[in-house]
Amino acid sequence: MRRLPLFVFGLVVAAATNAIAVEAPSNFMVPDAPKSLPDIAIADGGSKIGALADFRGKFVLLNIWATWCVPCRKEMPTLDRLQGQLGGPDFEVVALSIDRAGAPAVRKFFAEVGIQHLAVRFDAAAEAPFKLAAVGLPTTVLIDPKGQEIGRLIGPAEWDSPEMIGFLKATIAQRPGEQMSTPKQEKRS
């Protein structure tokens, strides 16, 4: 009788358990448990003012940014491509501008860089950075369908990289009760 190497056996056992965690990219901060978020007013490119709560029922990647922020400007096309690839009924990128000029500034920037998939949204109440404790720009918060924070990244990222897309796809597909882990956390079995 042939024996399986120990590491192969471990992989088979790990794959059979339901508690496998989705591993976040190394620069993604994951809280020990989902965190409640305050509601935030979100204005669209027209006259509608909605709220963060309007996105309940889907995963949301909320990006706090500004047109004058150089790293934000650099990452915005990657967020646009991410929305084009993954956006739909289960996931949406919400790029929330904190520009004081509001929708006109966002529209102008989107036209300059060729943004096609992101909606014009801005923080008309100038409250999002404070309510979300955003310590710098850009700040991106991953929100679960219940409206809770399940991850955060401060600073720019390549949102359309294979690693990030794989991580987000796995997060969207995970079953209730599964938890993300960071590379530094031990996976629970």
Image (cartoon, rainbow, N blue to C red):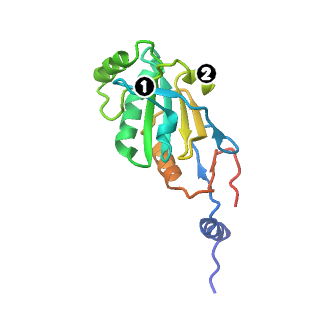
Badge 1: how crowded within 10 Å, few (<14), some, or many (20+)? many
Q: Residue at x 49, y 46 (%)?
A: 168
Q: Which of 150 and 185 is in front in this view?
A: 150
- Residue 30 appears in the picture as rendered: no
Residue ranking furthest to the bottom: 1
Mark 2 vs 1, N-terminal side: 1
- The answer to which quarter of the image holds residue 84 is top left
Question: Which amino acid, by three-letter code, is at mark 1?
Answer: Ala
Where 132 falls versus 8 (above or below)?
above
Q: Position of residue 150 (x, y in %)?
A: 60, 42
Task: Name the quarter where the N terminus is drawn.
Answer: bottom right
- Where is mark 1, residue-wise? 43
Q: Can residue 105 be seen in this view?
A: yes
SS of the residue under disc 1: strand
Q: Which of 59 and 13 is in front in this view?
A: 59
What residue is disc 2 on? 130
Q: Is residue 74 left or right of residue 10?
A: left
